[in-house]
Amino acid sequence: MNRQEQDKPAAVPHMARTDIQRKWQSQTKTVGLTLLLALLVGLLAGCSGSGLAQEGNTEGKLSITATTGMVADAAREIGGERVEVTTLMGPGVDPHLFKASQGDIRKLDRAAIIFYGGLHLEGNMTRILEKMAAQKPVIAVTDKMPREQLIGTGEGESGEYDPHVWFDVNLWKHAAEQVRDTLIQEDPDHAGQYREQAERYLEELEKLHQYVQQRMNDIPEEDRVLVTAHDAFGYFGRAYGVEVVGLQGISTAAEFGARDVSTLRDYLVEREIKAVFVESSLPARSMQAIIAGAAQRGHEVVIGGELFSDAMGEPGTEEGTYIGMVKHNADTIAEALQ
Ligand SMILES: [Zn+2]
């Protein structure tokens, strides 16, 4: 996943029909005895090399493993009942530092398709994803994003682009389209379903985009400054007209120093910034140090709330979905700064 590979159009390795069917079969979660028997028969047929019966295919779901919650959510929305999605990184997990455990590798092994963020978001997973790509489609949802719309980081080859693309909802539509196109390619029998579900989801994303824009417009222009722990909101700032300042770099893998703390403290004092934000996937102590520093200089700053940056909220809550997480962030920012 060097620069060159990322710039290539989505390469979806062709997969033999029977391979997919076999994978689906092995993924089938059905517990009914009849179905179990049908499955066994199907597997036997597969072993004898005669190909699998069509019925097995319709009972099984397409097994998808996604790295982050945001990517998994897109797969769930567009795949619907046709897919079974497993997420590697739960709430509060930092993708920049994430290392795949043995259990995670099993989840990747079991999948028929793997989706990941790309642009070096999952910096420690490059090797394992490359290995998996020899066996199955391993797709970066950022593959189709026009490179001219990405924010460069100027950090050389290992950090060519800012990977936090999901905070520009318009840009994230490309990720949804990438998921749709991959599902259609791998499961053409259900292309119509994927197209329909993607269309509905893209409409929801358009509504979300407009909602975020509205919320940011509620904030007086001079107060549209978002101070966070790491630079996760560059795309958000660019898309919705908010100045974004992060204490840490694009990746949390880089340490921040005392100089970063004092620079940011002085900035808060000079710009008279009222609120800063903590992130769900990062410890809050760095921002607390800055607030204390500003207080010593006689400027009061509060924590405006917790934003979801690189991970979503708990499953089953509103923030446990991509749309809910973005809404939560927009509301939290608007309420604290307005
Ligand atoms: Zn990040």
Image: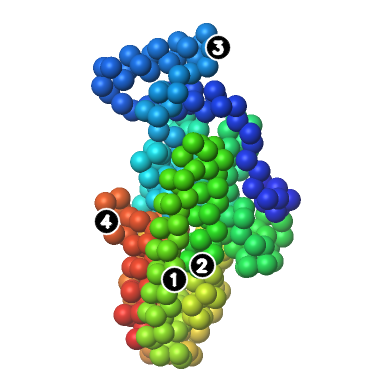
Q: Looking at the figure, which quarter contains the C terminus?
A: bottom left
Q: Earlier in the sequence, mark 1 or mark 3?
A: 3
| Residue at which label 3 appears | 49
Q: Nearer the viewer, mark 3 or mark 2?
A: 3
Q: Secondary structure at mark 2?
A: helix
- The local crowd at label 2, few if under 14, some if 14 to 19, many if 20 or more residues have their Cα within 10 Å, is some
Q: Could you give the CA–CA distance between mark 1 and mark 3, rounded to whole angstroms?
A: 50 Å
Find the distance from the CA under tag 3 to the CA under tag 2: 46 Å
Q: Is mark 2 within 8 Å of ligand 1?
A: no
Asked whether 43 or 123 is in front, the reply is 43
Image x and y of residue 163, in percent: 57, 59
Q: At 41% from the left edge and 58% from the top edge, which residue is drawn?
A: 200
* In the image, residue 171 above or below residue 311: below
Amino acid type of the residue that numbered disc 4 sits on in the rendered structure: Thr
**Residue 188, image x, y percentages:** 52, 38
- The crowd level at tag 1 (other Cα within 10 Å; few <14, some 14-19, many 20+) is many
In the rendered structure, which amino acid carries the disc numbered 1? Answer: His
Q: Are marks 1 and 2 in contact (CB under 8 Å)?
A: yes
The answer to whether the residue labelled 1 contacts the one labelled 3, judged by CB atoms less than 8 Å apart, is no
Disc nearer the start of the sequence (3/2) = 3
Sequence-wise first label, 1 or 2: 2
Q: Residues within 10 Å of mark 3 (few under 14, many from 20)?
A: few
Q: Name the spot of residue 237 as percent of width and height, x first.
A: 51, 75
Residue at which label 4 appears: 317
Q: Is residue 33 visible?
A: yes
Q: Which residue is mark 1?
A: 209
Residue 57 is left or right of residue 238, and the answer is left
Real-space Cα separation, disc 4 to disc 1, in angstroms: 21 Å
Element under disc 4? loop
Whichever of labels 4 and 1 marks the residue nearer the N terminus, that label is 1
Q: Earlier in the sequence, mark 4 or mark 3?
A: 3
